[in-house]
Amino acid sequence: MYFSKLTASLAKFARRIFRRLALHLPWRMAIGKFGILLCQIGRFLQVKYANWNSQFRLKVEYSADNWVDVHVSEMITTREVTTFRSKDSNHNFSTPLSKALFEIKGVVSFHFFPYKLQIEKAGVYYWSELLPQIEASLFKHLAGAGK
C-alpha cells in the first residue's frame, strides 16, 4: 500500500515538473540549443574521424604522354614538394621510396607531394609495364618496410 502511494506521488510529481518545463519557454530554448550543440559536435567528430577505418585508396591519372599522377590516401612525405630529376639529385631528402623508384627501369624523374606522386617515364616504356612495379614500391613504403 505504501509503495503504490509512493510511486503514484512520484509519478504525479514528475508529470507536474515535466509540464512546467515543457511550458516554460526559456527552458525549452535552453534544451533546444543544447540539442543543436550536440548535433554540431557530433557532425564535427564524424567529419574529423570518418577515415579512421577506411581502406587505402590509390588513384592513377595520366597527365601527359610521359607523366602520371598517383594520388594516395596516406601521406607520402611531410614536405610540400620534393623533386628527384636523377638518381644522384637531392641526396639530403633521399628516401627508400625514391631509391626503389629509380631502380625501376623506365622511371626518369618524379616529384613527391604529401598525397601525390608525379612520375615521368622514358618514352620507350609503357605505363602498363611500370605501374605495377611503382605501386609495389609505394605499398612497401607505406606499409612501413620502406621507412
Image: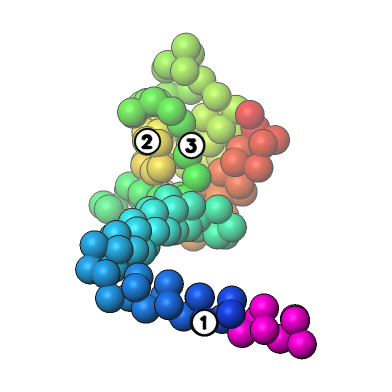
Q: CA distance from mark 1 to mark 2?
A: 67 Å
Q: Amino acid at mark 1?
A: Lys
Q: Is residue 78 above or below residue 45?
A: above
Residue 59 within the segment the image draws in magenta: no
Q: Which residue does the numbered mark 2 point to in the structure image?
A: 113
Range shown magenta: 1-8
- Secondary structure under badge 3? loop
Q: Amino acid at mark 2?
A: Phe
Q: Which of the numbered marks, if any, corresponds to residue 141? A: none
Judging depth in this view, the residue of 64 and 144 nearest the camera is 144
Using residue 130 as the reference point, say whether residue 145 is left or right of it.
right
Earlier-in-chain disc, 2 versus 3: 3
Q: Which residue does the numbered mark 1 point to in the structure image?
A: 12
The way the protein has been coloured in the rendering is rainbow
Earlier-in-chain disc, 1 versus 2: 1
Using residue 25 as the reference point, say whether residue 98 is left or right of it.
right
